[in-house]
């Protein structure tokens, strides 16, 4: 199948797109990949929607703004993909299926007292009708309903990508987006979990202070100093003592801890938190041959510097192995779409904590 995969992360930065040819087992070919920045009106709407979602009581109906935002997300994907396929000389009829993650506005991990809750907004029917292509979407809900974390979902693709590169196990893939997650790929098993914050806390801190959307090239963090006391307070969170698999929302750690710090010192401390949380992942005893870093966080030299200095295994970028580091998650949702169409599992006991391998996702026809 030739599938166009999409990913929009919690950074609310862009629609990532990638073409993959796959049967849901192996990767036959890679097509073009790219991104298109979110339009400001869509981003603003999603920021408001996220705030409302975070305050949504479980016993109340879905907020009305969800439907409006879901339509906007569908239109944003159509806008991005229309220019993408034209640029690469493609047409909608070239694709057997679209694999669309949707926009996460809420993610609550399960606790012993309650199941989790996760919301990825997308008007899939609207997108299917506009493109004339079937759309695979809603990849997390079934796992969460069955008691799983609902995240991360990319691990089964990380394993396929490693096989396609001829990388022998054990190896690890780290994605640093709004939240960071790691996949430990063994000979016959996968262990995956969110390690801690990715870029999300740094971005939020800067945005709250009116200093832009992100720390470009880590310049602010490079000029600051780590506040060890605050870093230790972050790392003392009970999250790190809990067993894997486990998942996070970008808002799960208190940003007010760095409020007394200058922007430079706050950025340096949050960078250290992101990196040290990844280092903690190796307390599980895994010693892969390499840590392959994907996602936007690999563009932050300060994060990469700390990881390289502190990780107990060699740290490599996705590009060191010929991977497209900015497109891995879009590729992953193309791959998951193929697995959904084939009735293959997309989440596993070692990746989301679900009791048995589970299928997931839904497909809507045009």
Image (cartoon, grey):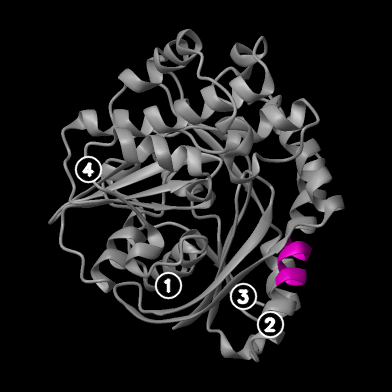
Classify residue 1 by image quadrant.
bottom left
| Mark 4: few/some/many CA within 10 Å (<14, 14-19, 20+) | some
* Mark 2 burial class by Cα count in 10 Å: few <14, some 14-19, many 20+: some
Between marks 2 and 4 in the image, the one whose residue lies nearer the viewer: 4
Q: Give the CA separation, mark 2 to mark 4.
A: 46 Å
Give the residue number, with chain letter if any, for mark 1: 338
Image position of 359 with respect to 99: above or below: above
Is disc 1 in contact with disc 3, using a CB cutoff of under 8 Å? Answer: no
Q: CA distance from mark 1 to mark 2?
A: 18 Å
Q: Please provide percent x and percent y for residue 44.
A: 83, 44
- Reading the image, the residue beneath label 4 is 313
Query: Does the magenta run of residues contain 79?
Result: yes
| Badge 2 element | loop
Q: Which residue is mark 3?
A: 365
Q: What is the total number of numbered labels drawn onto the structure image?
A: 4
The single residue placed furthest to the right in the displayed view is: 41
Q: Which residues are magenta?
A: 74-80
Identify which residue is drawn at 40% across, 55% down. 154
On whether residue 357 falls in the magenta region, the answer is no
- Comes first in the chain, label 4 or label 1: 4
């Amino acid at each position: 199948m030739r599938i166009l995969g999409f990913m929009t992360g919690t950074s609310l930065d862009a629609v990532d797109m990638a073409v993959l040819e796959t049967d849901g087992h192996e990767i036959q070919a890679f097509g073009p990949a790219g991104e298109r920045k979110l339009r400001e009106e869509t981003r603003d709407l999603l920021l408001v929607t996220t705030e409302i979602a975070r305050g949504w009581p479980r016993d109340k109906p879905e907020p009305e703004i969800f439907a409006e935002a879901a339509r906007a997300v569908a239109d944003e994907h159509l806008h991005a993909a229309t220019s993408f396929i034209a640029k690469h000389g493609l047409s909608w009829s070239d694709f057997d299926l679209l694999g669309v993650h949707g926009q996460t506005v809420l993610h609550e991990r399960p606790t012993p007292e309650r199941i989790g809750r996760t919301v990825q907004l997308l008007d899939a029917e609207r997108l299917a009708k506009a493109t004339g292509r079937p759309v695979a979407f809603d990849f997390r809900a079934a796992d969460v309903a069955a008691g799983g974390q609902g995240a991360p979902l990319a691990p089964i693709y990380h394993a396929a990508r490693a096989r396609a590169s001829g990388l022998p196990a054990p190896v690890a893939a780290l994605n640093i987006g709004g939240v960071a997650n790691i996949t430990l790929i063994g000979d016959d098993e996968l262990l995956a979990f969110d390690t801690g914050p990715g870029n999300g806390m740094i971005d939020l801190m800067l945005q709250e202070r009116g200093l832009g959307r992100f720390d470009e090239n880590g310049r602010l963090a490079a000029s600051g100093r780590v506040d060890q006391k605050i870093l230790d307070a972050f790392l003392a969170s009970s999250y790190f003592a809990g067993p894997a698999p486990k998942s996070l929302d970008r808002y799960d750690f208190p940003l007010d801890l760095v409020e007394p710090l200058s922007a430079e010192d706050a950025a340096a401390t949050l960078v250290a938190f992101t990196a040290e949380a990844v280092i903690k992942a190796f307390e599980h005893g895994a010693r892969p041959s390499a840590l392959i870093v994907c996602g936007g966080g690999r563009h932050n030299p300060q994060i990469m510097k700390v990881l390289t200095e502190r990780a107990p295994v060699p740290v490599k970028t996705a590009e060191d192995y010929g991977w497209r580091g900015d497109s891995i998650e879009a590729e992953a949702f193309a791959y998951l779409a193929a697995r959904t169409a084939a009735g293959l599992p997309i989440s596993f006991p070692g990746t989301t904590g679900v009791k048995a391998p589970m299928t997931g996702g839904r497909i809507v026809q045009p």
